[in-house]
Image (tube, rainbow, N blue to C red):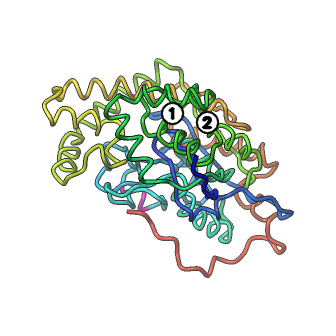
């Protein structure tokens, strides 16, 4: 087996976020004696109301929002990724929303490199960053850093991709089970992207992906974070998913996806593997009708929401906020404010941030203003 020196790697836990670059050392967890600074994280499944609640909370705290969403960061995809409305984004800065062209590849490592300076600048300005999103790996990478693992080997990846195309991803899954049963249990048999990366790690280093993960442990947080998850009864959540997809169609989802396809975007691009877009690509090629694609989008979004809930339930320190679906965003924000105050033992944001400065809150940051991602 070939042996490479380890770099830093984001494990691709959502099937969308892998990273193989050598530039992620700043994201590796470190420990020190300095007190950890606060970070508020709002998570939950798609259609749970995170964006509206975060917007209301940011207005109350006079803070800014950092999107931990592997789809909302793309430009030209505002409808299908349900990006916050422009009037919200003019009033409250939303970072990493609509900033990348759809043919650009993003991953957990790149997200960290973009997010960390934003968090640092908000702390210097005496604000508590509000991180909101449903991409669990992005959030975990920001909070705990990324594990070390080898960089990508393009030739090996091509060979594995060719095997997947020739024999199906299930052949990769069987091969992975022979060398790394724990990873095989954690990765779906049809998830070619994660299967390729898991096999790549093993073949390059002689160690399993699960061993690399166990070594990292994801146990040392880099921020004093409060994490709250929004939880709705399943029938309510599923009804909201149906309504949201139908509303996206009325707003022009099909036309948006068709424009991207006409511009040359397809499944080769990470952005187009998102819900709605990949189903519509099949309709554009004549494999399905548009109605079939919409029905498949609703069905697969419900499955995705279920996987998100499973992932978040495993996150240490997460507290759930149970909702019935009838609450206003302002009422949810009030409850989030109280939960943050309870965890930190002070009223956010001023009483919390003051503890990190020897003479209370600093004057307004002299840095260049943090620009909106419109």
Q: Farthest residue to the top: give it.
A: 235
Tell me residue 310's x, y (percent). Answer: 58, 27
Tell me residue 274's x, y (percent). Answer: 36, 40
- Residue wearing tag 1: 45
Tell me residue 132's x, y (percent). Answer: 55, 47
Splitting the image into 4 quarters, where does residue 42 fall? top right
Query: The magenta stretch spans which residues?
Result: 86-90
Q: Name the secondary structure under disc 2.
A: strand
Frontmost residue, 5 versus 12: 5
- Residue wearing tag 2: 229
Identify which residue is drawn at 18% across, 32% down.
283
Q: Earlier in the sequence, mark 1 or mark 2?
A: 1
Left or right: residue 165 compared with residue 228:
left
Frontmost residue, 157 versus 113: 157
- What main secondary structure does the magenta stretch of the protein show? helix
Identify which residue is drawn at 15% across, 36% down.
284
The quarter in which the C terminus is drawn is: bottom left
| Image height of 43 relative to 148, above or below | above
Tell me residue 105's x, y (percent). Answer: 40, 55
Q: From where the camera sits, is residue 270 visible? A: yes
Tell me whether circle 1 and circle 2 mark residues in contact (CB < 8 Å).
Answer: no
Identify which residue is drawn at 62% across, 40% down.
209
Q: From where the camera sits, is residue 65 visible? A: no
Frontmost residue, 274 versus 206: 206
Within-10-Å neighbours for mark 1: few <14, some 14–19, many 20+: many
- Report the label total: 2
Within-10-Å neighbours for mark 2: few <14, some 14–19, many 20+: many
Frontmost residue, 10 versus 67: 10
| Image height of 237 relative to 63, above or below | above
Q: Name the secondary structure under disc 1.
A: loop
Q: Farthest residue to the bottom: give it.
A: 366
Identify which residue is drawn at 52% across, 50% down.
68
């Amino acid at each position: 087996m070939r042996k490479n020196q380890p770099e830093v790697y984001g494990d691709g836990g959502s099937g969308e976020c892998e990273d193989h670059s050598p530039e992620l050392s700043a994201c590796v967890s470190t420990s020190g004696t300095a007190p950890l600074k606060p970070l508020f994280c709002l998570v939950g499944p798609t259609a749970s109301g995170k964006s509206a609640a975060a917007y209301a909370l940011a207005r109350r705290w006079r803070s800014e929002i950092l999107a931990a969403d592997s789809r909302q960061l793309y430009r030209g995809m505002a409808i299908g990724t349900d990006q916050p409305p422009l009037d919200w984004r003019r009033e409250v800065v939303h970072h990493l929303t609509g900033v990348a062209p759809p043919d650009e590849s993003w991953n957990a490592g790149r997200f960290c490199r973009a997010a960390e300076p934003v968090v640092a600048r908000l702390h210097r300005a005496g604000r508590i960053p509000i991180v909101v999103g449903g991409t669990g790996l992005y959030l975990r990478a920001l909070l705990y850093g990324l594990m070390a693992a080898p960089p990508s080997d393009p030739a090996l990846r091509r060979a594995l991709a060719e095997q997947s195309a020739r024999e199906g991803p299930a052949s990769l899954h069987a091969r992975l089970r022979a060398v790394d049963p724990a990873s095989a249990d954690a990765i779906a048999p049809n998830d070619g992207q994660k299967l390729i990366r898991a096999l790549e790690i093993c073949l390059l280093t002689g160690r399993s992906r699960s061993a690399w993960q166990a070594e990292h442990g994801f146990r040392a947080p880099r921020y004093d974070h409060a994490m709250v998850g929004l939880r709705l009864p399943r029938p309510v959540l599923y009804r909201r998913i149906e309504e949201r997809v139908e509303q996206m169609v009325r707003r022009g989802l099909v036309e948006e996806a068709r424009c991207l396809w006409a511009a040359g975007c397809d499944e080769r691009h990470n952005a187009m593997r998102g819900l709605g877009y990949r189903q519509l690509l099949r309709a554009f090629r004549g494999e399905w009708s548009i109605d079939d694609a919409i029905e498949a989008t609703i069905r697969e979004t419900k499955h995705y929401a279920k996987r998100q809930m499973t992932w978040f339930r495993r996150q240490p320190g997460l507290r759930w906020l149970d909702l019935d679906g009838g609450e206003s965003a302002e009422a949810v924000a009030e409850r989030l404010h109280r939960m943050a105050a309870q965890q930190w033992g002070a009223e956010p944001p001023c009483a919390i941030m003051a503890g990190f400065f020897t003479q209370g809150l600093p004057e307004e940051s002299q840095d260049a203003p943090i620009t909106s991602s419109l």
